[in-house]
Image (spheres, coloured by chain):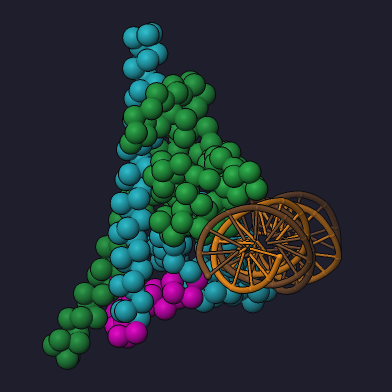
Chain colours: A cyan, B green, C brown, D orange
Amino acid sequence: MRIGELARRTGVSERSLRYYETQGLLTADRTPGGHRDYAEGAVDRVIRIQEFYAAGLCSAKIAELLPCVRDADGGPSAIATPRLVGDLSVERDRIDRKIDELRRSREVLDDVIATAAGETASGD
Amino acid sequence: MRIGELARRTGVSERSLRYYETQGLLTADRTPGGHRDYAEGAVDRVIRIQEFYAAGLCSAKIAELLPCVRDADGGPSAIATPRLVGDLSVERDRIDRKIDELRRSREVLDDVIATAAGETASGD
DNA sequence: GTAAGAATTGACACCGGTGTCAGGTTCAAG
DNA sequence: CTTGAACCTGACACCGGTGTCAATTCTTAC
Protein backbone atom coordinates (compact mmCIF):
# COMPACT_ATOMS: atom_id res chain seq x y z
CA MET A 1 0.00 0.00 0.00
CA ARG A 2 1.05 3.60 -0.44
CA ILE A 3 2.03 6.00 2.28
CA GLY A 4 -1.28 7.86 2.16
CA GLU A 5 -3.25 4.74 2.86
CA LEU A 6 -0.90 3.65 5.63
CA ALA A 7 -1.22 7.07 7.20
CA ARG A 8 -4.99 6.85 7.04
CA ARG A 9 -5.16 3.34 8.44
CA THR A 10 -2.81 4.02 11.34
CA GLY A 11 -3.70 7.58 12.12
CA VAL A 12 -0.03 8.48 11.84
CA SER A 13 1.04 11.33 9.60
CA GLU A 14 2.97 10.74 6.40
CA ARG A 15 5.65 12.93 7.86
CA SER A 16 6.08 10.56 10.76
CA LEU A 17 6.07 7.47 8.57
CA ARG A 18 8.95 8.89 6.53
CA TYR A 19 10.72 9.81 9.71
CA TYR A 20 10.38 6.25 10.99
CA GLU A 21 12.11 5.07 7.87
CA THR A 22 15.08 7.36 8.43
CA GLN A 23 15.29 5.92 11.94
CA GLY A 24 15.38 2.37 10.66
CA LEU A 25 12.03 1.46 12.18
CA LEU A 26 10.07 0.85 9.03
CA THR A 27 10.98 -0.30 5.53
CA ALA A 28 9.12 -0.13 2.27
CA ASP A 29 9.64 -1.34 -1.26
CA ARG A 30 9.76 1.30 -3.92
CA THR A 31 7.83 1.61 -7.15
CA PRO A 32 9.95 2.22 -10.25
CA GLY A 33 9.17 5.88 -9.76
CA GLY A 34 10.38 5.95 -6.19
CA HIS A 35 7.10 5.87 -4.30
CA ARG A 36 7.01 3.78 -1.13
CA ASP A 37 5.08 0.54 -1.23
CA TYR A 38 4.32 -0.90 2.20
CA ALA A 39 3.57 -4.50 3.06
CA GLU A 40 0.37 -5.32 4.92
CA GLY A 41 2.24 -5.89 8.17
CA ALA A 42 3.32 -2.26 8.22
CA VAL A 43 0.04 -1.31 9.86
CA ASP A 44 0.70 -3.36 12.97
CA ARG A 45 4.30 -2.31 12.99
CA VAL A 46 3.46 1.38 12.93
CA ILE A 47 0.99 0.97 15.76
CA ARG A 48 3.62 -0.86 17.76
CA ILE A 49 6.13 1.88 17.07
CA GLN A 50 3.67 4.45 18.34
CA GLU A 51 3.15 2.48 21.51
CA PHE A 52 6.85 2.33 22.12
CA TYR A 53 7.17 6.05 21.55
CA ALA A 54 4.30 6.61 23.93
CA ALA A 55 6.14 4.45 26.44
CA GLY A 56 9.02 6.87 26.31
CA LEU A 57 11.47 4.83 24.27
CA CYS A 58 13.65 6.70 21.79
CA SER A 59 14.03 5.77 18.14
CA ALA A 60 17.37 4.05 18.64
CA LYS A 61 16.03 1.74 21.35
CA ILE A 62 12.96 0.93 19.32
CA ALA A 63 15.14 0.12 16.35
CA GLU A 64 17.08 -2.38 18.44
CA LEU A 65 13.99 -3.77 20.03
CA LEU A 66 11.71 -4.27 17.05
CA PRO A 67 13.59 -7.23 15.53
CA CYS A 68 13.16 -9.08 18.82
CA VAL A 69 9.41 -8.62 19.00
CA ARG A 70 7.22 -11.50 17.92
CA ASP A 71 4.96 -10.12 15.25
CA ALA A 72 1.38 -11.12 14.70
CA ASP A 73 2.52 -12.89 11.55
CA GLY A 74 4.80 -15.02 13.69
CA GLY A 75 8.03 -14.57 11.76
CA PRO A 76 11.22 -15.68 13.45
CA SER A 77 12.24 -13.03 15.92
CA ALA A 78 15.77 -12.19 16.96
CA ILE A 79 17.04 -12.79 20.45
CA ALA A 80 17.92 -9.73 22.46
CA THR A 81 21.55 -9.37 23.39
CA PRO A 82 22.41 -9.27 27.09
CA ARG A 83 23.16 -5.57 26.77
CA LEU A 84 19.78 -4.91 25.20
CA VAL A 85 18.06 -7.00 27.83
CA GLY A 86 19.71 -4.83 30.46
CA ASP A 87 18.54 -1.68 28.72
CA LEU A 88 15.03 -3.02 28.30
CA SER A 89 14.85 -4.00 31.94
CA VAL A 90 15.66 -0.44 32.87
CA GLU A 91 12.95 0.78 30.51
CA ARG A 92 10.46 -1.68 31.90
CA ASP A 93 11.11 -0.50 35.43
CA ARG A 94 10.74 3.07 34.30
CA ILE A 95 7.44 2.20 32.66
CA ASP A 96 6.24 0.53 35.84
CA ARG A 97 7.01 3.64 37.83
CA LYS A 98 5.35 5.76 35.19
CA ILE A 99 2.20 3.67 35.33
CA ASP A 100 2.10 4.17 39.09
CA GLU A 101 2.51 7.90 38.66
CA LEU A 102 -0.25 8.00 36.09
CA ARG A 103 -2.54 6.05 38.36
CA ARG A 104 -1.94 8.49 41.20
CA SER A 105 -2.62 11.48 38.98
CA ARG A 106 -5.66 9.78 37.58
CA GLU A 107 -7.05 9.27 41.05
CA VAL A 108 -6.46 12.89 41.97
CA LEU A 109 -8.23 14.01 38.81
CA ASP A 110 -11.08 11.68 39.55
CA ASP A 111 -11.33 13.07 43.03
CA VAL A 112 -11.47 16.66 41.80
CA ILE A 113 -14.05 15.74 39.20
CA ALA A 114 -16.15 13.80 41.68
CA THR A 115 -16.00 16.59 44.22
CA ALA A 116 -17.16 19.11 41.67
CA ALA A 117 -19.96 16.80 40.58
CA GLY A 118 -21.04 16.35 44.18
CA GLU A 119 -21.09 20.08 44.81
CA THR A 120 -23.04 20.68 41.65
CA ALA A 121 -25.55 17.99 42.55
CA SER A 122 -26.11 18.95 46.19
CA GLY A 123 -25.62 22.61 45.57
CA ASP A 124 -24.09 23.50 48.94
CA MET B 1 13.13 26.15 53.95
CA ARG B 2 15.44 27.42 51.22
CA ILE B 3 15.38 26.41 47.61
CA GLY B 4 18.44 24.23 47.96
CA GLU B 5 16.86 22.12 50.64
CA LEU B 6 13.59 21.84 48.77
CA ALA B 7 15.48 20.72 45.69
CA ARG B 8 17.34 18.12 47.70
CA ARG B 9 14.23 16.82 49.41
CA THR B 10 12.17 16.55 46.25
CA GLY B 11 14.82 15.58 43.77
CA VAL B 12 13.71 18.48 41.58
CA SER B 13 16.29 20.97 40.34
CA GLU B 14 16.39 24.53 41.62
CA ARG B 15 15.92 25.60 38.05
CA SER B 16 12.61 23.77 37.88
CA LEU B 17 11.42 25.07 41.24
CA ARG B 18 11.96 28.64 40.05
CA TYR B 19 10.21 27.78 36.82
CA TYR B 20 7.22 26.43 38.72
CA GLU B 21 6.96 29.76 40.46
CA THR B 22 6.83 31.66 37.17
CA GLN B 23 4.04 29.30 36.13
CA GLY B 24 2.05 30.03 39.25
CA LEU B 25 2.37 26.51 40.60
CA LEU B 26 4.40 27.23 43.68
CA THR B 27 4.75 30.22 45.96
CA ALA B 28 7.34 31.16 48.51
CA ASP B 29 7.87 33.88 51.04
CA ARG B 30 10.96 35.98 50.61
CA THR B 31 13.65 36.84 53.09
CA PRO B 32 14.44 40.54 53.39
CA GLY B 33 17.26 39.91 50.96
CA GLY B 34 15.03 38.27 48.38
CA HIS B 35 15.78 34.61 48.95
CA ARG B 36 12.87 32.21 48.68
CA ASP B 37 11.53 30.69 51.87
CA TYR B 38 9.28 27.71 51.33
CA ALA B 39 6.66 26.34 53.69
CA GLU B 40 6.83 22.71 54.73
CA GLY B 41 3.95 21.77 52.47
CA ALA B 42 5.99 22.74 49.44
CA VAL B 43 7.59 19.31 49.41
CA ASP B 44 4.31 17.50 48.80
CA ARG B 45 3.22 20.13 46.38
CA VAL B 46 6.34 19.81 44.25
CA ILE B 47 5.97 16.04 44.14
CA ARG B 48 2.37 16.44 43.07
CA ILE B 49 3.40 18.89 40.38
CA GLN B 50 5.92 16.42 39.06
CA GLU B 51 3.28 13.73 38.91
CA PHE B 52 0.98 15.96 36.93
CA TYR B 53 3.77 16.82 34.55
CA ALA B 54 4.54 13.14 34.18
CA ALA B 55 0.87 12.60 33.44
CA GLY B 56 1.20 14.92 30.47
CA LEU B 57 -0.56 17.98 31.86
CA CYS B 58 0.84 21.36 30.92
CA SER B 59 1.68 24.09 33.39
CA ALA B 60 -1.49 26.04 32.73
CA LYS B 61 -3.75 23.07 33.47
CA ILE B 62 -1.82 22.21 36.59
CA ALA B 63 -2.12 25.79 37.76
CA GLU B 64 -5.90 25.57 37.41
CA LEU B 65 -6.07 22.17 38.94
CA LEU B 66 -3.88 22.57 42.02
CA PRO B 67 -6.26 24.78 44.00
CA CYS B 68 -8.91 22.09 43.67
CA VAL B 69 -6.77 19.29 45.01
CA ARG B 70 -7.23 18.28 48.60
CA ASP B 71 -3.81 18.57 50.19
CA ALA B 72 -2.44 16.32 52.87
CA ASP B 73 -2.81 19.20 55.31
CA GLY B 74 -6.50 19.26 54.51
CA GLY B 75 -6.93 22.94 53.75
CA PRO B 76 -10.14 24.00 52.09
CA SER B 77 -9.93 23.18 48.41
CA ALA B 78 -11.61 25.06 45.61
CA ILE B 79 -14.34 23.54 43.51
CA ALA B 80 -13.50 22.98 39.87
CA THR B 81 -15.53 24.98 37.41
CA PRO B 82 -17.63 23.05 34.88
CA ARG B 83 -15.19 24.04 32.16
CA LEU B 84 -12.26 22.73 34.16
CA VAL B 85 -14.13 19.55 34.95
CA GLY B 86 -14.61 19.05 31.24
CA ASP B 87 -10.94 19.59 30.58
CA LEU B 88 -9.93 17.28 33.36
CA SER B 89 -12.25 14.57 32.11
CA VAL B 90 -10.52 14.75 28.77
CA GLU B 91 -7.18 14.49 30.51
CA ARG B 92 -8.34 11.58 32.60
CA ASP B 93 -9.45 9.68 29.52
CA ARG B 94 -6.16 10.42 27.87
CA ILE B 95 -4.34 9.12 30.93
CA ASP B 96 -6.43 5.96 30.89
CA ARG B 97 -5.51 5.35 27.29
CA LYS B 98 -1.90 6.06 28.06
CA ILE B 99 -1.88 3.58 30.89
CA ASP B 100 -3.23 0.95 28.53
CA GLU B 101 -0.54 1.76 26.01
CA LEU B 102 2.12 1.55 28.65
CA ARG B 103 0.82 -1.77 29.81
CA ARG B 104 0.95 -3.16 26.28
CA SER B 105 4.50 -1.94 25.77
CA ARG B 106 5.47 -3.27 29.14
CA GLU B 107 4.18 -6.71 28.22
CA VAL B 108 6.06 -6.70 24.96
CA LEU B 109 9.26 -5.73 26.74
CA ASP B 110 8.67 -8.44 29.29
CA ASP B 111 8.18 -10.93 26.52
CA VAL B 112 11.41 -9.96 24.80
CA ILE B 113 13.29 -10.07 28.07
CA ALA B 114 11.79 -13.43 29.04
CA THR B 115 12.53 -14.91 25.63
CA ALA B 116 16.13 -13.83 25.85
CA ALA B 117 16.40 -15.24 29.34
CA GLY B 118 14.95 -18.54 28.20
CA GLU B 119 17.38 -18.79 25.30
CA THR B 120 20.29 -17.97 27.55
CA ALA B 121 19.22 -20.57 30.07
CA SER B 122 18.52 -23.43 27.69
CA GLY B 123 21.18 -22.40 25.25
CA ASP B 124 19.47 -23.60 22.07
C1' DG C 1 -0.90 14.09 -23.99
C1' DT C 2 -2.67 16.26 -20.10
C1' DA C 3 -4.51 17.45 -15.78
C1' DA C 4 -5.20 16.49 -11.00
C1' DG C 5 -4.05 14.08 -7.13
C1' DA C 6 -0.53 11.81 -4.60
C1' DA C 7 4.34 11.19 -3.37
C1' DT C 8 9.26 12.70 -3.12
C1' DT C 9 13.08 15.23 -0.69
C1' DG C 10 14.77 19.03 2.01
C1' DA C 11 14.54 22.63 5.15
C1' DC C 12 12.82 25.37 8.90
C1' DA C 13 10.16 25.75 13.18
C1' DC C 14 7.80 24.36 17.23
C1' DC C 15 6.96 22.83 21.94
C1' DG C 16 8.00 23.40 26.90
C1' DG C 17 10.27 21.70 30.73
C1' DT C 18 15.00 21.54 31.90
C1' DG C 19 20.35 22.23 31.85
C1' DT C 20 23.72 25.54 32.19
C1' DC C 21 26.41 29.68 32.30
C1' DA C 22 27.25 34.56 33.68
C1' DG C 23 27.41 38.32 36.71
C1' DG C 24 25.82 40.00 40.81
C1' DT C 25 23.73 39.77 45.76
C1' DT C 26 22.69 37.69 50.27
C1' DC C 27 23.52 34.81 54.15
C1' DA C 28 25.95 32.88 57.96
C1' DA C 29 30.08 31.64 60.28
C1' DG C 30 34.61 33.00 61.76
C1' DC D 1 34.83 42.78 58.18
C1' DT D 2 35.72 38.90 55.38
C1' DT D 3 35.00 34.85 53.01
C1' DG D 4 32.78 31.04 50.84
C1' DA D 5 28.56 28.88 50.09
C1' DA D 6 24.04 29.65 48.63
C1' DC D 7 20.84 32.31 46.06
C1' DC D 8 19.18 35.82 42.69
C1' DT D 9 17.75 37.07 37.65
C1' DG D 10 18.24 36.67 32.80
C1' DA D 11 19.50 34.53 28.71
C1' DC D 12 20.60 30.88 25.52
C1' DA D 13 20.23 26.07 24.08
C1' DC D 14 18.61 21.46 23.89
C1' DC D 15 15.76 17.47 22.77
C1' DG D 16 13.32 14.79 19.16
C1' DG D 17 9.14 13.65 17.21
C1' DT D 18 6.04 16.26 14.49
C1' DG D 19 3.78 20.18 11.54
C1' DT D 20 4.30 22.62 7.52
C1' DC D 21 5.80 24.75 3.32
C1' DA D 22 8.23 24.58 -1.27
C1' DA D 23 9.70 22.85 -5.48
C1' DT D 24 9.68 18.47 -8.17
C1' DT D 25 8.25 14.20 -9.78
C1' DC D 26 5.24 10.09 -10.21
C1' DT D 27 0.74 7.96 -11.06
C1' DT D 28 -3.58 7.42 -13.01
C1' DA D 29 -7.68 8.36 -15.43
C1' DC D 30 -9.57 10.74 -19.20
Front-most of residues B35 and A29: B35
Residue sitting farthest toward the left: B122
B81 is higher (above) or lower (below) than B93: above
Q: Work out which quarter of the rendered image holds the C terminus of chain A and state it.
A: top left
Magenta residue check for A60: yes
Magenta residue check for A53: no
Measured as percent of width and height from the top left, residue A15 is found at 62, 61
Q: Choose top left, top right, bottom left or bottom right for residue B110.
A: bottom left
Residue sitting farthest toward the bottom: B123
A21 is higher (above) or lower (below) than B55: below
Q: Is residue A30 visible?
A: yes
Measured as percent of width and height from the top left, residue B27 is found at 54, 40
Q: Which residue corresponds to the image point at 59% horizontal and 44% vertical from the top-left?
A: B31
Is B113 on the left or on the right of B67, as rendered?
left
Measured as percent of width and height from the top left, residue B4 is found at 51, 58
Q: Is residue A5 visible?
A: no
Q: Which residues are magenta?
A: A59-83
Is B40 on the left or on the right of B18, as rendered?
left
Q: Which residue corresponds to the image point at 24% horizontal and 81% vertical from the top-left?
A: B116
Q: Which residue corresponds to the image point at 38% horizontal and 27% vertical from the top-left?
A: B75
Front-most of residues A28 and B3: B3
Residue sitting farthest toward the top: A123
Front-most of residues A66 and A40: A66
Q: Which residue corresponds to the image point at 44% horizontal and 66% vertical from the top-left?
A: A57
